Every structure is written in C-alpha cells, then in structure tokens.
Amino acid sequence: MNGNFTFHNPTRLHFGENAMAFLADELAAFGPTVQLCYGGGSIKKNGIYDQVVAALKAAGKTVVEDGGVMPNPTLEKLLDGAAKAKANNVDLILAVGGGSTIDYAKAVSVSAWCEEDPWQKYFTRFEEPTCRLIPVGSVLTMVGTGSEMNGGSVITNHAANLKVGKVFGPAVFPKFSILNPRFTLTVPRRQMVSGIYDIMSHILEQYFSGTDDNTSDYIAEGLMRSLVVSSRAAVKNPENYEARSNIMWTATWALNTLIAMGKSTDWEVHMLGQAVSALTDATHGMTLAAVSLPYYRLIKPYGLRKFARFATNVWGVSADGKSDDQIADEGLAALEAWMREIGVAMNITELGATEAMIPQLVKATFRLNGGYKQLTEEEVAEIFRQSL
Ligand code: NZQ
Ligand code: ZN
C-alpha cells in the first residue's frame, strides 16, 4: 500500500431478518419530526411502508410524507423536498427504498438549509456543505448502489442533460441503515440484475487502477468472487435468501470507501453510464453494463498485468503457457459470459440511445484521470459507437 489515508465510516448497520427491530432505538435518538421519503409505491404494496409507519407512530413522531422519488431522482424533486424539509423543520430524513431514495434524502439533507443554489454548489462546483445538515437514516429495499453506507448522491438535471454524482464526506452518510434481505425479495428480476451489475462495476472501477501491491485489491477480488457465486444462485432462484443476503452485504462493502483506501480509482464506466442515463433515463446498472466491455477492451493494454490478474484470481483462468494478453482476453470473455448469463443490457440501443445521440453523450461524459488511461473525446465516441 503506497497511499496515505483516513478511514472513517460512521454509518451503523443493522443486518438480517430481524433488522427492523432496531428502528425504534434509532428513531429515539432524533427529534419529533421525520420526513419519510420513498419511491413510486413499491413499499405500499409489499408492506414495508406499514411497518415503518408503525415504528414511527410507536416512537411518537410526526410524519412529513415525501413519496414519489423517481429512479434517477431529478433536481426539481430535490428542490421540492428541500423546501418541505425546511418548512417543516424536520429532525430526521428517513429514506425507505433503493439508491435513488437514499441519494435523494442526502441531497435534501444538504440543500434544505443551504443559502445557495444546491445544483451549482454541490453538483457543479462539488463543494462541501457549509449549512446545517439534517440527519439521514435509511431502510434499504433494493440492493446495488451502496448508498446505505456512503456519501454518494446522484441527481439528474434534465434541462442540462446531465446526471451528476457528488460524493459527500462522512457527515452526510446515513446515521443508520436497516438491511433486511427479505425486503429485497419483491424487487423485479430486471432490477435485481441491474443492481448486481452495479455492484460488479463499483468493484471493477476501484480495482482497475494503480500498480502497487494493495490489500484493497485482494478484498475486491474476494467481493467479486462472492458476487459471481451468489448472483448465479439468485438468478436461478430469486427466493434464495442466502444468495440475496450475500449480495446485499457485498453491495455495501463494494462502495463504502473501504476498497478505495490507499489507491487511485477509475470510475470512467460510471461517467459513460451516467451520460446514457442523462439522455435516456435508463436504469443505472444497465447503463454501466452496456458500455463496460468496449471500455475495458480499449483500456486493457494500459493495465495489462491487472487484467491478467483479474482473469486468474476472479475467474480462475489458467495462465499456463499463455501471454498476459491472452489471459486478459479470457478474463474479459468470462466477464462477458457471466453478464449474458445473468441477463444485463449488452448495448445502449436497447436502452433507448441512438447513433444520433453520440455527440450529446460525449458532451455529457466527464473524462476522469484515475484509471489506466484518460480517454480522449474521440475514444469516448468510439466506445459509444461500439456500445450501440
Ligand atoms: O420507486 P419504487 O416504487 O420504490 O420502485 C423502485 C424503483 O422502481 C423499485 N424497488 C425498490 N425496492 C423495491 C422495488 N420494487 C419492489 N420491491 C422492492 N423491495 O426498484 C426501482 C429502482 O429503484 P432505485 O432506487 O432507482 O434503484 P437503485 O438502488 O439502483 O438506485 C439507482 C440510483 O442510485 C444512483 C444511480 O445513479 C441512480 O440514480 N447511484 C448512487 C450511488 C451512491 N449513492 O453511491 C452510486 C451508484 O453508482 C449510483 O450511481
Ligand atoms: Zn453505480
């Protein structure tokens, strides 16, 4: 490990079938008014809403309803929610849902008392909050983003054709998160698979960077191996609790800052995917899957040894008598076969993108420099062409 770092993750997690029993204790630590954020209604159908409201009532809380958080939450929704939080002087924002709802709750937390335009401050200038923050807690119902234990918040500004993620520091992480794998069993198959690929992409994008011998990379390999085994089992039988619970725990550790410690990270696949989402509103994990293989095949020569290591350590590719290039190709072929097996989107056309959109997609793609190669605009365009 060559890096210097401080690791601090303040989120308290309650995991397992009995995790909801801890919500009462957590609620007791906050004042009387709770903004209850949730999505388009899945929690009303599967009974999670009733359980949460019962806990809030038992704790004597006044509930400020804030439903209708859409997948890929928008700036308009954020501004409405922030106004609501301020007007009701809420003491806690309780997000019940997936990454969209939790990301939104964090954005409301930093925007409610912000004197400036939140889009400009956080999602354009990437500044840290300087105002009073409203604490956030979460009950996770959909697995993938890691939002339950990190500072990420991704907001879509349709007027600007941009989807932008801001990574806030520990003050904005959820104070607590309730992780009951049973709550995820009603997630539709396509959404489950999208979440699985999102997890894989988070790990890959922290793994494919750096050249030192780094413990973070060994942890990443272990997480990927667990994910491959559990995802296969979950796709065969989505009711498999053991598989679903492993996936839930893997997702949390894939993006709670741990495996980024002491190394550089790439994140270009997320930049490419977010551009696709900004223009098509497609499901997050699917946008990542659709651009990944052209991206990795393009950068492979610049990080060849790591791609060969990925093949042997994650996919069990035999290295005997082969060049690094051959081994690396077999690793990417194994990744592709797994993607097809679990059923992710393999191109951006099926997500609604067209060739005519490529100039706009290129414009919406941030080109980062933490990976093995910083892309040129022409390379970004080429990746999108190959992803059609
Ligand atoms: O809205 P409802 O009705 O709840 O339905 C949701 C939504 O349609 C449904 N769902 C969630 N739990 C369910 C369920 N349906 C049935 N049963 C349940 N138990 O699933 C759909 C997708 O939910 P969403 O929250 O959008 O999914 P996800 O968790 O993948 O979040 C995606 C958002 O997170 C951002 C993405 O960009 C995207 O905006 N990300 C956040 C990150 C972070 N905080 O660090 C990092 C990620 O890379 C990602 O960028
Ligand atoms: Zn993601």
Image (spheres, rainbow, N blue to C red):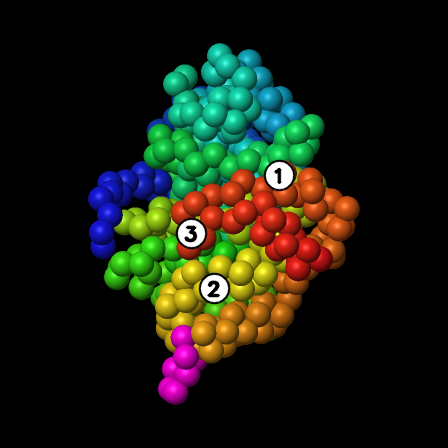
Location of residue 204 in the rendering, given as x and y in whole percent from the top left corner: 45, 58
SS under mark 3: loop
SS under mark 2: helix
Location of residue 2 in the rendering, given as x and y in whole percent from the top left corner: 22, 51
Look at 64% across and 66% down and name the residue there.
Answer: 343
Image quadrant holding the C terminus, namely bottom right
SS under mark 1: loop
Q: Is residue 158 magenta?
A: no
Q: Is residue 201 above or below residue 136?
A: below
Q: Where are the magenta residues, as a range?
A: 315-324
Image quadrant holding the N terminus, namely bottom left
Disc 3 target residue = 371
Q: Cβ of disc 2 within 8 Å of ligand 2?
A: no
Look at 62% across and 70% down and name the residue there.
Answer: 340
Is 95 placed left or right of 2 in the picture?
A: right
Q: Is residue 183 above or below residue 359?
A: below
Tell me which amino acid carries mark 3. Gly
Disc 1 target residue = 364
Q: Is residue 316 magenta?
A: yes
Disc 2 target residue = 300
Disc 2 residue crowd, few under 14, some 14–19, many 20+, Cα 10 Å? many
Tell me which amino acid carries mark 2. Lys
Instruction: Give the CA distance from mark 2 to mark 1.
Output: 24 Å
Between disc 3 and disc 1, whose residue precedes? 1
Instruction: Answer whether residue 341 is visible to the viewer in this image.
Output: yes
Look at 45% across and 53% down and name the residue there.
Answer: 373
Instruction: Give the CA distance from mark 2 to mark 3.
Output: 11 Å
